[in-house]
Image (cartoon, rainbow, N blue to C red):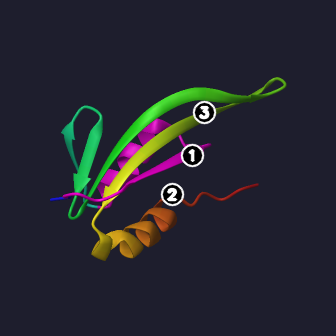
Amino acid sequence: MVVDVPLIVHDIRDIPLWLLREDLLEMGGTATVEDEITGKGWRVRPTPLEPFRLGLLEVGQVRLEIEVDDNREAEFRERFAKKTFRARG
């Protein structure tokens, strides 16, 4: 259970909300309520944002509110980075 930890806010572009949720579930998380996924020592609330626009280009964005125990933060960040890494062309 995550208790009294600082909130990390991270905005991500180019990965759809459904795929981020799937990645978090594959990391061992469980959907506890509609907008929250909880794992061992961490909790994430993904929220869709308005698309990022540059001219005619539109890219989806998601805000992640992450709470993670201090002793698990480095492990969570490493696993999350590997899980969400996508090949860029």
Q: Which residue is mark 1?
A: 12
Number of the front mark, 2 or 1: 1
- In whole angstroms, how far apart are the C-alphas of marks 3 and 2? 15 Å
Give whichever of 7, 13 is nearer the camera.
7
Asked if 41 appears above or below 21 in the picture, the reply is below
Instruction: Based on the picture, tell me whether residue 87 belongs to the magenta stretch.
Output: no
Give the residue displayed 63% in from the left and 27% down from the top: 51
Q: Which mark is residue 72?
A: none
First in sequence: mark 3 vs mark 2: 3
Q: Amino acid at mark 2?
A: Thr
- In whole angstroms, how far apart are the C-alphas of marks 2 and 1? 10 Å
Number of the front mark, 1 or 3: 1
Give whichever of 77, 87 is nearer the camera.
77
Instruction: Residue 44 in the image: state x and y as whole percent.
Output: 33, 48
Within 10 Å of the Cα at label 2, are there few (<14), some (14-19), or many (20+) other Cα atoms?
A: some
Asked if 66 appears above or below 62 in the picture, the reply is below
Secondary element under disc 2, as helix, strand or loop, is helix
Instruction: Residue 2 in the image: state x and y as whole percent.
Output: 20, 58
Within 10 Å of the Cα at label 3, are there few (<14), some (14-19), or many (20+) other Cα atoms?
A: some
Give the residue displayed 50% in from the left and 67% down from the top: 82
Asked if 12 appears above or below 29 in the picture, the reply is above
Asked if 56 appears above or below 80 in the picture, the reply is above
Contact check, label 2 and label 1, Cβ < 8 Å? yes
Instruction: Residue 86 in the image: state x and y as whole percent.
Output: 60, 57
Magenta stretch in the rendered image:
3-27
Q: Is residue 74 left or right of residue 89?
A: left
Q: Which residue is mark 3?
A: 60
Instruction: Based on the picture, tell me whether residue 10 belongs to the magenta stretch.
Output: yes
